[in-house]
Image (cartoon, grey):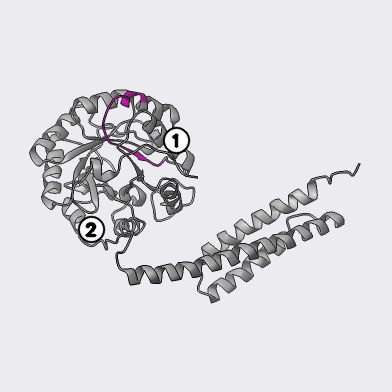
Amino acid sequence: MKLNLDILPLSSWLNTGKEPLVISGPCSAETEEQTLSTAHLLAATGKVSVLRAGIWKPRTRPGEFEGIGSIGLQWLKRAKEETGLLTAVEVATAKHVEEALAAGVDILWIGARSTANPFTVQEIADALKGVDVPVLIKNPVNPDLSLWIGALERVNRAGIKKLAAIHRGFSSYEKTAFRNEPMWDLAIQLKTIAPDLPILNDPSHICGNRELIPYVMQKAVDLDMQGFIIESHIDPSVAWTDAKQQVTPAALAELIDHLNLRHADSNDPVFEDKLAHLRKEIDKLDDQVIKIVADRMKIVEKIGEYKRENGVTILQVNRWDEIIQKRQNLAKALNLDLDFTVKLMELIHNESIRKQNVIMNDKPVQEV
């Protein structure tokens, strides 16, 4: 499956000459002084191309700071005039779109909560018809690739060709070190079906704290994401929103300096030849893996028939526990990640149950 988007390459509409692309600024525009001071410090690093700031802030609960409102757009306009930085804001309604464009905002983005609601996305898309403005779309709050794709399609069909995605992580019931689980596999899936779509990483919202940001940024670079949208505040300790995940402009510059930048391709023929050889070996092993799984499923079908004949249930927990324990021991001996091993076995086990369920519950066709 390939996603059919009519989009322009990033270099044709945001060619800053800086690598990686960095969009940065405070989570919230709080005061004119805070906004302008942060903008000047970011511009002085020489590493930031676009100033971002939250103007309208959708909060989880009422009573929290929900953004300074439209007056903040004028602060961004002044910051752009004084620093030369482009500006970007989040929009969640048609009115936001109209006000942002009227104030000369250069780039709009759609937040995770909005992406999760097709009605909201369609309202924004309708407001964008006939407008030539870049739009960035964050992944939805929940791990739903279809919602992310749907939002991209709706905005693209409104005529927006300057389009990019933002990977900001997904909510999860499991409590981990991350504020939002990266779930890199979903970003990789999007990149696979839409290889021409630029994807930026949002380490601030993935991490929820400053300590994990370097790890996430390097991982994003290694996965060939084109840049970052990252929160920066002149003094994060007194930030009105998301203080723990914001960094100072100086700290941001240091983070970028310490990135190990890599490229998707190499011009070295010796490297490419060796890579091609190793990939052939991978292909051969992958074929063997698929064949072995297919052979395993044939045995599963025989077990299903035997259970049906003897009135035995499909699921036998003791047997499943035994399989997991043995495979984990083997994985440990072979230096394989235990979580990966369990997930792999769960996939195979679920397919085994599905096959046995078909065999045990589908009535055979009667001969005429």
Residue at 23 percent of width and 58 percent of height: 255
330 above or below 211? below
User: What residue did someone put label 1 on?
Assistant: 150
Residue 323 vertical placement versus 191 (above, below):
below
Return the residue found at the far right: 368
Give how far apart the Cα atoms at labels 2 and 1 are. 33 Å
Q: Secondary structure at mark 2?
A: helix
Q: Which residue is mark 2?
A: 255
Secondary structure of the residue carrying numbered label 1: helix
Left or right of residue 350, residue 142 in this image: left
Mark before the other along the chain sequence, 2 or 1 = 1
| Figure disc tally | 2
The quarter of the displayed image where residue 347 is located: bottom right
* The magenta stretch spans residue 134: yes
If the image is split into quadrants, where does the C terminus sit? top right
Crowding at dot 2, Cα within 10 Å, few <14 / some 14-19 / many 20+, comes out as some
Determine whether 364 is above or below 123 in the image.
below
On the rendered structure, is 367 left or right of 241?
right
> Does the magenta portion include 309?
no
Please identify the residue farthest to the left as the structure is shown. 82
Question: For this rendering, which residue is in front, 76 or 180?
Answer: 76
* Residue 282 location (% of width, % of height): 50, 67
- Which residue is at the front of the view, 142 or 85? 85
User: On residue 352, which mark appears?
Assistant: none
Residue range highlighted in magenta: 126-139
Tell me which corner region of the image, top left, top right, bottom left or bottom right, holds residue 123: top left
Q: Residue 240: where, in percent of width, then height?
A: 24, 40
Q: Position of residue 84 (x, y in %)?
A: 11, 40
Mark 1 neighbour class, 10 Å CA radius: few under 14, some 14 to 19, many 20 or more = some
Q: Amino acid at mark 2?
A: Leu
Which is more toward the observer, 166 or 203?
166
Please, what is the three-letter code of the amino acid marked with disc 1? Gly
